[in-house]
Image: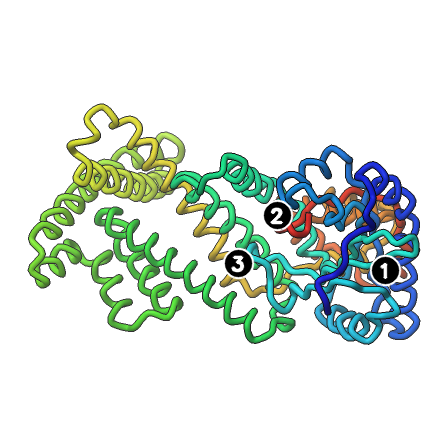
């Protein structure tokens, strides 16, 4: 499908007025297409619904024209926006085929299949630009509900990335090193969330060969970074953490495509006392051996000191169990923090002098970021336990609140008249770990809760996530 035509050659004010008139046209367009799908494929699109976005403010459009379109406002194709929300890859595959067959009838002028080849952030959608009866070009998307929720939750990350890019562009300069590091961190955080949502919805079945290869490269890079993180933590974690973290480092090295020899070296360096120093000496690198020995000695001392402090605190809270837990946490924190700080001092002694406080803060921040990123990544890739989906919960829960309902269930049932509100509350319950309560209620009351789903309301709503400037 082609790259599409621009909007009519009107002034921005005239084009905005045309967009106002085009709002009900897109609403009819989306609802008619959904009705067509439901009639042609009975029972397969019962849970799908069309969602109309509010008209973009003209001030936002002016900013976008300046930043992204070199002042050409006729290239803006999303003043008027709407999307069809679906749940399964089977539904998306049917829509793919229908849009290909009906391209001319649907007046589709631009078609991008990001389920086949995901965007840089790993967001996925079918994005089309359609010509409405009044000649206005509008954006019509096919979004999967789990990805849509993840998009709303990560929108602030996208905005931060966009701000960094636009600032550098307006100042006619490349990104600084600090900006690049922050931009890459924001990108990875979005990828983790979108990968988790895509895995949950089984969307990898829609990838083409190029898309699958690209995602595999990105995932291997992530696994390599995790292997490096665990190796670093293991080497700097002292006598307590080395074995466990070293084993994880080796596992992620293999998962990222590394050889068995590379994995073994990662484990040896982190798990064996002074293992990295021994390898450095075997390679004849005396400077590296001196550095690794200094760092490990410091981390071991820090680990033992941290264990003692942690045990003392744990004893005050809960003697026995608290003592053991406190010692373990203290050992890990003391070893990692001391080892990391020692490495910084070793590498930058001539420059640091009065920066010890800054280095300590940096060590704490790096440790926190590493643990948070590792937690999110491990959850995304190794938790294959089937999760309760929004659509399943919507279909299974009753339509009225009962006195015996857990708070998590009652909160969802209260907003069930609006699918959009239900999706929002479902995401909040999921974020706070309340889905097991909802699943338990459904399992316990299954015969009574299988009721027809109410018709979703088609209230205009503001959906805000767009993964790249080209979709804003």
- How far, Cα to Cα, is label 2 from label 1? 25 Å
Left or right, 13 with reference to 322: right
State which tag comes first along the sequence, 1 or 3.
3
Q: Nearer the viewer, mark 3 or mark 2?
A: 3
Q: Quadrant of residue 408?
A: top right
Q: Which residue is mark 2?
A: 433
State which tag comes first along the sequence, 2 or 1.
2
- How far, Cα to Cα, is label 3 from label 2? 15 Å
Q: Is residue 444 visible?
A: no
Q: Nearer the viewer, mark 2 or mark 1?
A: 2
Element marked by disc 2 = loop
Residue 318 vertical placement versus 289 (above, below): above
Q: Quadrant of residue 272?
A: bottom left
Q: Which residue is mark 3?
A: 380
Q: Which residue is mark 1?
A: 448
Element marked by disc 1 = helix
């Amino acid at each position: 499908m082609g790259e599409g035509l621009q909007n009519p050659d009107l002034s921005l004010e005239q084009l905005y007025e045309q967009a106002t008139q085009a709002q009900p046209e897109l609403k009819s367009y989306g609802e008619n297409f959904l009705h067509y799908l439901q009639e042609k494929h009975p029972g397969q699109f019962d849970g799908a619904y069309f969602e109309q976005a509010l008209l973009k403010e003209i001030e936002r459009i002016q900013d976008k024209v300046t930043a992204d379109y070199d002042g050409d406002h006729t290239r803006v194709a999303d003043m008027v926006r709407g999307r069809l929300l679906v749940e399964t890859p089977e539904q998306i595959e049917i829509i793919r085929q229908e849009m290909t067959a009906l391209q001319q009838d649907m007046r589709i002028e631009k078609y991008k299949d990001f389920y086949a080849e995901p965007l840089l952030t790993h967001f996925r959608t079918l994005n089309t630009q359609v010509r409405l009866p009044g000649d206005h070009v509008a954006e019509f998307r096919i979004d999967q509900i789990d990805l849509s929720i993840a998009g709303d939750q990560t929108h602030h990350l996208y905005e931060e990335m966009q701000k960094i890019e636009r600032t550098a562009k307006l100042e006619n300069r490349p990104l600084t090193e600090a900006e690049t590091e922050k931009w890459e961190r924001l990108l990875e955080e979005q990828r983790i969330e979108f990968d988790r949502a895509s895995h949950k919805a089984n969307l990898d079945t829609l990838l083409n060969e190029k898309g699958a290869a690209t995602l595999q490269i990105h995932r291997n890079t992530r696994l390599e970074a995790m292997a490096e993180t665990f190796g670093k933590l293991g080497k700097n974690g002292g006598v307590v953490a080395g074995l466990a973290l070293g084993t994880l480092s080796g596992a992620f090295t293999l998962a990222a495509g590394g050889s068995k020899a590379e994995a073994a070296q990662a484990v040896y360096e982190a798990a064996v006392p002074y293992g990295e120093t021994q390898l450095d000496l075997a390679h004849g690198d005396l400077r590296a051996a001196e550095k690794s020995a200094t760092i490990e000695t410091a981390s071991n001392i820090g680990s033992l000191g941290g264990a003692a402090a942690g045990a003392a605190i744990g004893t005050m809270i809960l003697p026995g169990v608290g003592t053991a837990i406190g010692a373990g946490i203290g050992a890990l924190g003391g070893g990692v923090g001391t080892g990391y700080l020692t490495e910084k001092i070793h590498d930058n002694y001539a420059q640091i002098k009065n920066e010890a406080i800054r280095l300590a803060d940096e060590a704490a921040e790096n440790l926190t970021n590493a643990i948070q990123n590792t937690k999110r990544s491990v959850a995304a890739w190794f938790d294959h336990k089937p999760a309760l989906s929004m659509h399943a919960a919507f279909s299974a829960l009753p339509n009225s609140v009962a006195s015996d309902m857990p708070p998590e269930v009652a909160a969802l049932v209260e907003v069930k008249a609006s699918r959009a509100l239900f999706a929002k509350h479902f995401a909040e319950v999921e974020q706070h770990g309340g889905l097991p309560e909802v699943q338990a209620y459904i399992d316990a009351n299954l015969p009574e809760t299988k009721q027809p789903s109410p018709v979703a309301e088609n209230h205009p709503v503001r959906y805000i996530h767009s993964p790249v400037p080209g979709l804003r």
